[in-house]
Image (cartoon, helix red, strand yellow):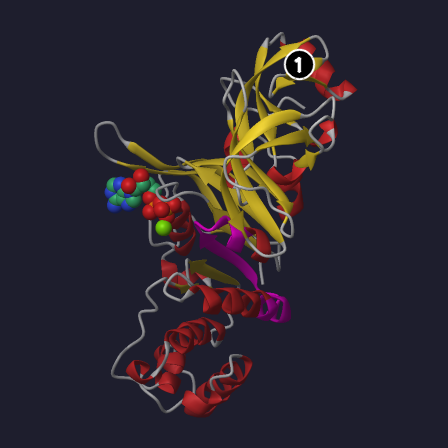
Amino acid sequence: MAQVSFDSASRVYAGSPPVRAVDRLDLAVEDGEFLVLVGPSGSGKSTALRMLAGLEDVDEGTIRIGDRDVTHVPPKGRDIAMVFQSYALYPHMTVAQNMGFALKLQGLPKATIAEKVAEAAKLLDLEKYLARKPKALSGGQRQRVAMGRAIVRDPAVFLMDEPLSNLDAKLRVETRANIAALQRRLGTTTIYVTHDQVEAMTMGHRVAVLKDGILQQCDTPRALYDRPANAFVAGFIGSPAMNLHAAAVEGDKIRLGGLDIPLPRESAAAVHGSGLAEVTLGVRPESLTLVPADTPDGFGVVVELVEELGADALVHGSVAGESGDRLVLRVDGRTPPTLGQTITVTVRNPEELHLFHPQTGDRLV
Ligand code: ADP
Ligand code: MG
């Protein structure tokens, strides 16, 4: 087990202009932690992981595993095991041979290899399949063999790059819970890459959000959700996404849906301090609620789409009147509004509003 740190680490691909695929990344992963790197496609997740694995040059900065500077150490000397999206199993080898292959290369005695493979097979529920070849396995089983291959090496760090993307939705949910449980049990420091924010939020002790090679925020799932550091993280984390709109501020009030909503003291002070007349206002779909039509602090929303999810329903609509801003709100699934209807909506609690700088996107409070 080990800590891992990126200290101002960059990977710059030559070209005109050069691509800063990972740009001065500062990230410290604790011993035993499950850290998820998440971001849209092309944000530098795989590059960051491959830099840590030694599969990619580090053009600036340093990378440490434990107290060792591994920036220029070849992959073999880093004591890490990686699970890729393509499981890269050897088709001509059995499950047991696939799982034990790295140990065989290390020259471990046969009996030791068999013991480690048996142990990992038990953890992964693969005991029945040890003699099979990969082609005779389901997608989920192959994924577990790939995990097994990493586990038998008992590395200081596990690296996983979208290891569930080849599985169907149901199996993905099941497998992500299994991987999280396995990691807890083994206690091995793990860095896990995904573009799926739900996967990130459900699996990570902490989640690091990348965009264009730049770390946006690294925090617990709860903190990312409740206090996103900028408008990008606010829009990226959470499903459906947070509603984000330009909103005018006047005095201690912010304008939403034609209403002036009083801001909490702290937010009002921050807006005053910034001297901004307009901010980017963020409201989560569950921070909006349906109210009776004559409620004084409610505003009209024309319903354009209702997604019934069972327990709740997602209502997509446009603010009636001038702004026409599109909004999504989460309502009780038993009595969803109908298409074309104008509903009355209010903000559940002004404390739940998020304010961002209209240009930089940075959180104001
Ligand atoms: P992610 O895994 O988040 O989808 P990547 O780390 O694969 O993103 O890529 C990050 C950025 O680096 C992208 O803009 C990608 O086009 C670029 N990139 C990746 N590999 C290379 C390469 N070998 N040469 C040039 N650019 C690359
Ligand atoms: Mg990738």
Which residue is nearer to you in this view: 157 or 42?
Answer: 42
Towards the viewer: 216 or 335: 335
Is residue 21 toward the left or the right of residue 309 in the image?
A: left
Measured as percent of width and height from the top left, residue 191 is found at: 50, 55
The quadrant where residue 92 appears? bottom left
Residue 265 drawn above or below residue 174: above
- Residue 267, image x and y in percent? 71, 20
Residue 260 lies in quadrant: top right
Count of all numbered marks drawn on residues in the image:
1
Q: Nearer the viewer, residue 20 or 73?
A: 20
Q: Is residue 23 above or below residue 299?
A: below
Q: Is residue 228 visible?
A: yes
Give the residue at mark 1.
271
Q: In the rendered image, is residue 238 in sight?
A: no
Residue drawn at 66 percent across, 41 percent down? 223
Magenta region:
181-200
Q: Is residue 280 magenta?
A: no
**Pointer 1 local density, CA inside 10 Å: few below 14, some 14–19, many at least 20:** many
Q: Is residue 199 left or right of residue 143?
A: right
Rendered residue at 49%/62% (across/down)? 158
Residue type marked 1: Val
